Image (cartoon, rainbow, N blue to C red):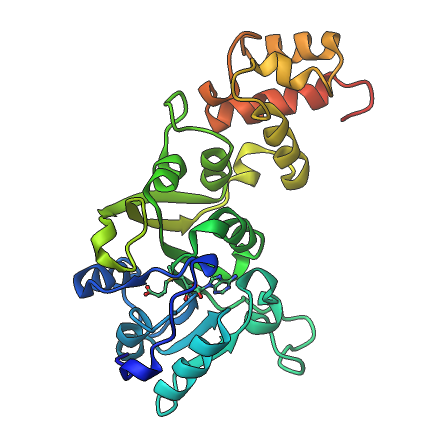
Amino acid sequence: MKPSRAGVARSKPKLGQHFLKDASVAARIVEALGELSASTILEIGPGRGALTSLLVKKARRIIAVEADRVLAAQLRMHFSLQPNVEILEGDIRAMDFSTLFGPKPGSSRPGIEQTPQQVRVIGNLPYYITADILLRLFEYRKYFDVIVIMVQEEVADRLVARPGSRDYGLLSATAQLYARLEKVSSVPPGAFSPPPKVYSAIVRLVLAPRLEQLGVAEADFMRFLKLAFQQKRKTLWNNLKSRYPSRELTRAMQRANVKPTVRAEALSLEQSAGLFRALIDSAPQGV
Ligand code: SAM
């Protein structure tokens, strides 16, 4: 989108507004989403339309959610002749994805379960709410299959980190519980206007939730992970002892073959899930 100078809204740092100016980076992000001709795309924070302008030529339908009222109005005008683009003004964290992507009233037939439409998500994210946005997308994962996002590079490294590495933590464990992740490429500050203070990176997530395979209930296991990672310097034992009695903890760790002295970041998701299940079995009446 190339609005006239007068039409260019000043960037708002509070909304994480660093607009992409490097066309090759924009093309790389869109390319990472794969074949789009039959796809519906959810774009988070379209800004001045650097990604939207590419998507409009490739995707069947684009729903772009922008929090900035002025930008949303400019985008609406710019794409007014494109029937496949819908600009919604609002906070992505408050969007009701079930209403947007779920079955429409009157469209379901008794006894026939509808498969939700699969939506691909793209966004050069406002960095201050990256984790919130990801958690929300995971919550509504039945609607999404592939997510390609630009995030702060440090966050990208945490998202894809392997257990035992310096960067592995709660964010890595959570993301890897719901998706297979890949860092596509690093992006220097000069690709944006205004340039951010940090490097960025493109990350691709293919949703593949592992809750069933690991034999864990979502809310309880998330609570367990939060506790296990609560204080990075503490051992797993010390983080867990506020909730679990010592006897149960000892028994469960023995059963799951986990040493009390390890830290949560050393455990694979399989090992964390094994310990979580052993704790349920060790509790007098479940946990
Ligand atoms: N996609 C554009 C690009 O690549 O040039 C803009 C990216 S800029 C990093 C982030 C965009 O997200 C801004 O346009 C900002 O106004 C918007 N934004 C910030 N917070 C948001 C929120 N909670 N919901 C939706 N959009 C948001």
- The answer to whether one can see residue 79 in this image is no
Say left or right for 165 vs 286.
left
* Quarter residue 27 falls in: bottom left
Q: Is residue 199 left or right of residue 140?
A: left
Percent coordinates x, y for residue 179 in the rendering: 44, 45
Query: Residue 265 location in percent, x, y?
Result: 47, 22
Q: In the rendered image, which quarter contains the C terminus?
A: top right
From the viewer's perspective, is residue 233 above or below residue 96?
Answer: above
| Place of residue 147 in the rendered image (x, y in percent of width and height, measured from the top left) | 39, 56
Q: Residue 149: percent from the left, percent from the top?
A: 36, 54
Q: Total number of numbered labels?
A: 0
Looking at the image, the residue that sits furthest to the left is 24
In the picture as drawn, the residue positioned furthest to the right comes out as 285
Write the residue at 72% across / 18% down: 242
The quarter of the picture showing ligand 1: bottom left
- Quadrant of the image for the N terminus? bottom left
Tell me if residue 94 comes above or below residue 156 in the rendering.
Answer: below
Q: Residue furthest bottom?
A: 81
* Residue 263 showing in the rendered view: yes
Q: Nearer the viewer, residue 160 or 151?
A: 151
Give the side of residue 162 with respect to residue 69, left or right: left
Q: Where, by quadrant of the figure, is residue 245 drawn?
A: top right
- Vertical side of 238 occupied by 105: above or below: below
